[in-house]
Amino acid sequence: MKSGRPAFAVAFAVLAALPSCASKPKAGADASPSASVSASVAPTASASAAASAEPEDIVFDEPDAAVISEPDGGDPRFADLPARTVQKDGSFKIASKALQAWVHRYPDDETPYLGYLRAGTIVDRSEHPIVQTKRCKAGWYEVLPKGYLCAGRRATLDVNDPVVVASWKRPRRGEPLPYFYVRPGEPPPLLYFTLPSLKDQIRFEGPKLKEHIAIHTPSRLQNVDVLGKPDPIPDFLAPGKQLPNPYGAKGRLRYVVQEGKANPQAAFALMSVHEHEGRLFGLTTELDLLAIDRTKIVRPQATRGGHIDGLPGGIVLTHGAPRYTIDEEGKRKTDGVYVRHEVVGLTGESKGELLKTIDDHWVQSGVLQMLKPRGSFPSFATESRKWIDISIKSQMLTAYEGTKPVYVAYVSTGLGEMGDPVKTFATVRGAFTIKSKHVTATMTGSAQADYELADVPYVQYFHESYALHGAFWHDSFGRVHSHGCINLAPVDAAWLFEWTDPQVPPDWHGANATADQPGTVVYVHG
């Protein structure tokens, strides 16, 4: 993406029109953002069979995240700002009541974004506003660890604001999936804006609902254990109370107790789950309620990479591959098994087909995809600098600190393989840096009936709209699968997100790279 404004200007354009890892411009077309929806190009013939598993024409709902560039000393327009007074764990708070409450570098909405807060997040602020502006009459407040937040449509000093209270759960950063996730069943669930009485449920879901509930009791739902124990019904969900709309959420027409059916090709992130009238209801991040017995509960994939302390090494290709010990007489004995995609460090010693591991075991070479040391390194692999190596041909990600590998994992890159990223669903190749990071970001289609995947986990943009992100909708890691983005298993995406730069502050939902906090290098090659 290219910013159409000066260095100090806001890097935020038309969200829904941004080309994405799954939306390719026509050959020869201008790939920069425009007011029209991006045109898609069919994948190559060799990849077409797998294409149905990946959402079509998806666009990430996130702003253009240009690296902030400033002269030494910052913007001279704000040279006279008072010394910062905001205190950690202080008495003064400000809360987000929007899906994205933007933190700016300076107290002016035309200065760059540093990041943003998700609805319900409460953070420390300065006691008094630093300045009031024409478009922020309630004033700009200092927040931690840096930047300024405007009290207005997106943020409030009232920590008891209805949106703040209802958005009561924070994402579980560091876990494979930061929320619970569900996909619509058949028929798709209704979206309720209040906990409906059984009478209203029957009115809108049909006379056979009691029979449906009797069959689909909470204990019988597939993968229900993922959700854990339901939360008690909080006061804001008491009978008769209606849920508010966070600023920036999709506006829907409300009728009695419901807002219509969910997009059948959607996915929803749930903050919490509550039992009501014999059913489980999930509260989405956009403050809608849906009956979980009308959905398919997502279970995080077991696939994962792992830490490695140098190379050579290997990744186990099959479940149950035997792990051996060798006694003094040279006889081998099975001493456990490896799981598929487990990372194994090797010493370089071998005995026939057996390779010695760094934990003094032995493994058959035939069950491993070998990870060999690099013969040379790119110029940016200096000292302990972090960088990510992604091989399209091997579908492998290796995280390095200087010349030392620290983590390896399978990925799924674009279906176009080594094709032209402009004309096919290929992943762009080259050396880039991470521009912005998002604990979650929503992927939506260009047409009303397209996919709408809420809160895709651990999104990291590195070039235009190409990103590294977790994928909970497939388990094809190690094979091409995406429309251009680099898909990771949720466990790997969670680890990588916390390891890379820029760091996202604990209370923030997203952060942009800056001149003083540049992004980690991402090197994509064949």
Image (spheres, rainbow, N blue to C red):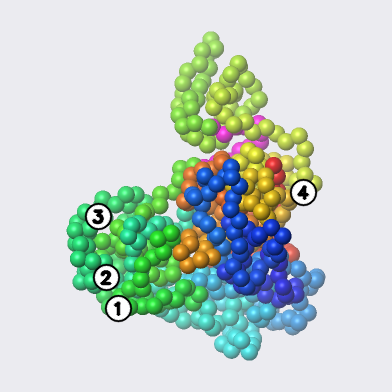
At label 4, which amino acid type do we have?
A: Phe
Q: Residue 31 at x, y = what percent?
A: 69, 63
Question: Gap in Å between the C-alphas at discs 4 and 3?
Answer: 56 Å
Mark 4 neighbour density, 10 Å: few (under 14) some (14–19) many (20 or more): some
Q: Residue 78 at x, y = what percent?
A: 73, 81
Instruction: Identify the residue shown where x is 63% and y is 38%.
Output: 394
Q: Which residue is mark 1?
A: 256
Q: Which residue is mark 2?
A: 204
Q: Is mark 1 in CB contact (under 8 Å) with mark 2?
A: yes
Q: Which residue is mark 3?
A: 216
Question: Gap in Å between the C-alphas at discs 1 and 2?
Answer: 10 Å
Q: Identify the disc placed on residue 380.
A: 4
Question: Gap in Å between the C-alphas at discs 4 and 2?
Answer: 60 Å
Q: Quadrant of residue 130?
A: bottom right
Question: Earlier along the polypeptide chain: callout 4 or callout 3?
Answer: 3
Q: Is residue 123 above or below residue 445?
A: below
Residue at disc 2, secondary structure: helix
- From the image, state whether disc 4 or disc 3 is nearer to you: 3
